[in-house]
Image (spheres, helix red, strand yellow):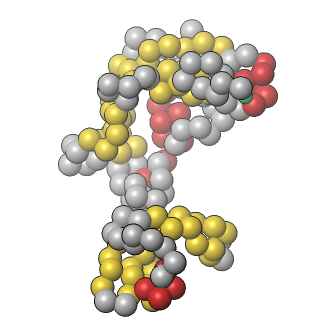
Amino acid sequence: MKIEKNSVVSIDYKLTDEQGIVIDTSEGRQPLTYLHGVGALIPGMENALTGKAVGEKFTVTIQPEEAYGQRDESLLRVIAAEELKDIPDLRVGTQLQADTEAGVKVFTVIKIEGDKVGIDGNHPLAGVTLNFDLDVKEVREATAEEIEHKHVHGPGGHSH
Ligand code: ZN
């Protein structure tokens, strides 16, 4: 069967950036299993997979608009280290949750200099063009319960 809305799909994938550096891969792990058409994956990936069938292997290039969006430079902030004094082991790469005008956002520490800390609220892949090597391993119809829950049950999914 072909992948359509409410298919349960298992894929092997390799994600690389524009320089060919591997960002993420299912190699050495179980394939990624997800419910198609409910926004579980980034839009560019779901669009590329729609209509594909088991055994299809292909590469897709996804622009930031269909992935994690463009970078928003207003999410780069500098704050006083004093404000973060309760956070143990603060270093570059530490992730913090902060309240913003747009709700709770995750910020990543990108620089620590003296009593100032630079933080970035962009998704690490914002502004990045993504290349996915995809290999469709399994496609089945979702059960009524999976559709109701909007996620996959059983292997690779929820176990409740
Ligand atoms: Zn469930």
Q: Nearer the viewer, residue 11 or 84?
A: 84
Residue lying at 56% horizontally and 67% vertically, measured from the top left? 97
Quarter, ligand 1 = top right
Residue lying at 59% horizontally and 37% vertically, measured from the top left? 40
Q: Is residue 39 left or right of residue 138?
A: right
Above/below status of 69 relative to 13: below
Q: Quadrant of residue 29?
A: top left
Q: Please state, as top left, top right, bottom left or bottom right, where the C terminus lies in the image.
A: top right
**Residue 78 pos. (x, y %):** 43, 85
Q: Nearer the viewer, residue 86 or 103?
A: 86
Looking at the image, how many numbered discs can be counted on the residues? 0
Above/below status of 122 relative to 55: below
Q: Please state, as top left, top right, bottom left or bottom right, where the N terminus lies in the image.
A: top right
Above/below status of 83 relative to 4: below
Residue lying at 54% horizontally and 23% vertically, measured from the top left? 156
Q: Quadrant of residue 140?
A: top right
Q: Nearer the viewer, residue 100 or 87?
A: 87
**Residue 81 pos. (x, y %):** 43, 86
Above/below status of 60 relative to 157: below
Residue lying at 49% horizontally and 80% vertically, measured from the top left? 84
Q: Is residue 16 visible?
A: yes
Q: Is residue 59 visible?
A: no
**Residue 115 pos. (x, y %):** 37, 90
Q: Is residue 68 left or right of residue 8?
A: left
Q: Quadrant of residue 26?
A: top left
